[in-house]
């Protein structure tokens, strides 16, 4: 026969002597499956389909704070923090032939475009939000039309252009 719990004294917690109340045990059983914790989430169907059909993952810089780089612009050397002082969306075009700037020619009033040189390898374009985070980044020196379309989509999504 199991021992009978003693009555709780004033100021003493009964859960230590008797375990959690019945309502808490019921909630615990319904919140988690019998095996314990819920199964980890898998990527949703649309994401798996996009990976299957060749859509690539975004550049590693996307979603991170803009890197502190010193670039050479038409007016001399400048850091990204200096270029972003206007608190407007900023596109830094590091491509050969300024193809990203040309892709946003019709959105020049919504996005400030800076053509520069001197970025790190693997980074040829940055679309920086006013809060300093990277909304889009490109990695090819000569972006194809699909990458330019991704840039225009990002501008439309983030800045409602």
Image (cartoon, rainbow, N blue to C red):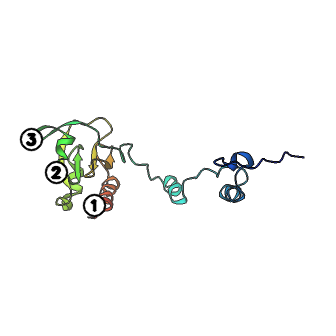
Of the image marks 3 and 1, the number of the one nearer the N terminus: 3
Disc 2 versus disc 1: distance between alpha carbons?
15 Å
Q: Position of residue 149 (x, y in %)?
A: 32, 58
**In the rendered image, which residue does mark 3 sit on?**
75
| Label 3: element kind | loop
Q: In the orientation shown, which residue stands out farthest toward the bottom?
A: 160
**x, y (%) of residue 50?**
48, 56
Which residue is label 2 attached to? Answer: 86
Q: Rate crowding at label 3 as few (under 14), some (14 to 19) or many (20 or more) other CA atoms within 10 Å.
A: few
Residue identifier under label 1: 159
- Whether residues under marks 3 and 2 lie with C-beta atoms below 8 angstroms apart, the answer is no
Residue 21 quadrant: bottom right
Q: How many marks?
A: 3
The quarter of the picture where residue 153 lies is bottom left
Image coordinates of residue 142 in percent, x first then y, are 28, 46
> Of tags 2 and 1, which is closer to the observer?
2
Of circles 3 and 1, which is in front?
A: 1
Quadrant position of residue 102: bottom left
Of the pair 130 and 96, the residue shown nearer to us: 130
SS class of the residue under badge 2?
loop
């Amino acid at each position: 026969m199991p021992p009978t719990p003693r009555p709780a004294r004033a100021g003493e917690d009964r859960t230590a002597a008797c375990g959690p109340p019945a309502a808490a045990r019921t909630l615990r059983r319904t919140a988690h499956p019998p095996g314990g914790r819920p199964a980890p989430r898998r990527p949703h169907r649309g994401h798996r389909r996009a990976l299957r059909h060749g859509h690539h993952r975004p550049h590693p810089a996307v979603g991170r704070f803009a890197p502190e780089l010193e670039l050479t612009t038409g007016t001399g050397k400048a850091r990204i923090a200096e270029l972003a002082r206007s608190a407007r969306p900023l596109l830094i075009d590091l491509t050969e032939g300024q193809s990203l700037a040309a892709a946003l020619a019709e959105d020049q009033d919504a996005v400030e475009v800076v053509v520069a040189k001197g970025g790190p390898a693997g980074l040829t374009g940055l679309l920086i939000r006013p809060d300093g985070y990277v909304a889009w980044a490109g990695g090819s020196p000569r972006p194809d039309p699909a990458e330019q379309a991704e840039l225009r989509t990002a501008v439309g999504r983030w800045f409602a252009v």
